[in-house]
Image: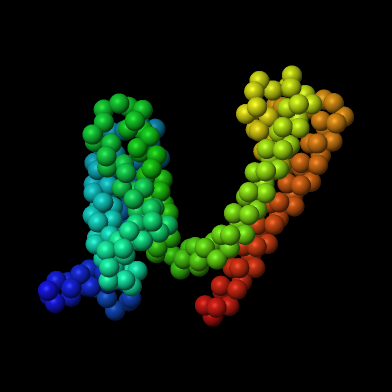
């Protein structure tokens, strides 16, 4: 039993971001970084070939093996010697990213071209695995975790405003929109101040709503930027 626990702890030490003195851990980190970089190559190709298929399957199996090991040692990660540790860890952001990176492996069970391409899209999540190996990204993750309540509140406020302005403009100038989704699209690009111009109100009241949406958008975009910047500066001071 003690030997099993010692082996399990050693696995945990290797798969976690290692110290400079741990050669096995350092090699494992380099292997994972290499797999992440190589695993993204097929997404830059327009069509599949023999090499891209081999890369897809080979890196997918590496990510699957890594995910299993992280779940297996999650009691050390969570600091809880209980089966709940495995459940808690499975729903942490990094564990979800690891799972998304594994999903493309299941494309081998499908022959439909569209389904295979959809599974491949999950490979983009592999990029997020780099968070684990970057100190700056770890800091940013901590920052976002700290201010998630405020950011969710801003997101909800933005969603409410978009829905309200879409309803206003949809009732004022219904002939501009094929359906309500078009009105939501207009409200979104207006509040973000992008304004593609493919849908533009012609009445004075409609233009007034557009102007208000643009001004409100400037304020709403600045709000999360200020929240994140303040939290980031606090996190930097804490690390120093």
Q: Is residue 21 left or right of residue 193?
A: left
**Residue at the spot 65% in from the left edge and 43% down from the top edge:** 159
Q: Is residue 29 visible?
A: no
Is residue 109 at least partly visible in the picture?
yes
Q: Provide residue 186's location: percent of width, then percent of height.
A: 69, 32
Instruction: Quadrant for residue 67, please give it.
Output: bottom left
* Residue 163 in picture, x, y percent from top left: 68, 37
- Residue placed most toward the observer, 106 or 14: 106
Residue 150 x, y percent position in the rendering = 62, 59
- Quadrant (top left, top right, bottom left, bottom right) of the C terminus: bottom right
Which residue is at a point 18% across and 73% down the rendered structure image? Answer: 5
Q: Nearer the viewer, residue 9 or 83?
A: 83
- Give the position of the N terminus as an image quadrant: bottom left
Q: Depth check: 78 or 143 in front?
A: 78
Q: Is residue 219 left or right of residue 229?
A: right
Note whether 100 is above or below 52 in the view shown.
below
Q: Residue at x 59, y 68 (%)?
A: 232
Q: Using the rendered view, name the quadrant where residue 147 is placed.
A: bottom right
């Amino acid at each position: 039993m003690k030997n099993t626990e010692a082996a399990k702890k050693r696995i945990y030490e290797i798969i976690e971001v290692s110290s400079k003195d741990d050669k096995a851990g350092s090699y494992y980190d380099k292997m994972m970084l290499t797999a992440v970089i190589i695993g993204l190559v097929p997404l830059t190709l327009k069509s599949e070939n023999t090499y891209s298929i081999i890369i897809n399957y080979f890196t997918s199996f590496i990510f699957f093996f890594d995910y299993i090991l992280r779940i297996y040692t999650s009691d050390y990660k969570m600091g809880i010697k209980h089966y709940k540790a495995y459940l808690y860890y499975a729903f942490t952001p990094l564990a979800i990213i690891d799972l998304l990176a594994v999903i493309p492996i299941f494309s081998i069970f499908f022959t439909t071209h569209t389904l295979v391409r959809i599974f491949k899209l999950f490979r983009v999540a592999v990029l997020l695995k780099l968070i684990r190996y970057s100190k700056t990204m770890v800091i940013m993750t901590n920052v976002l975790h700290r201010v998630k309540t405020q950011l969710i509140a801003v997101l909800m406020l933005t969603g409410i405003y978009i829905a309200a302005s879409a309803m206003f403009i949809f009732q004022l100038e219904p002939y501009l929109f094929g359906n309500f989704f078009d009105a939501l699209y207009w409200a979104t690009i207006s509040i973000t101040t992008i304004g593609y111009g493919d849908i533009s109100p012609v009445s004075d009241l409609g233009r007034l709503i557009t102007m208000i949406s643009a001004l409100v958008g400037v304020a709403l975009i600045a709000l999360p930027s200020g929240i994140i910047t303040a939290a980031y500066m606090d996190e930097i001071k804490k690390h120093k």
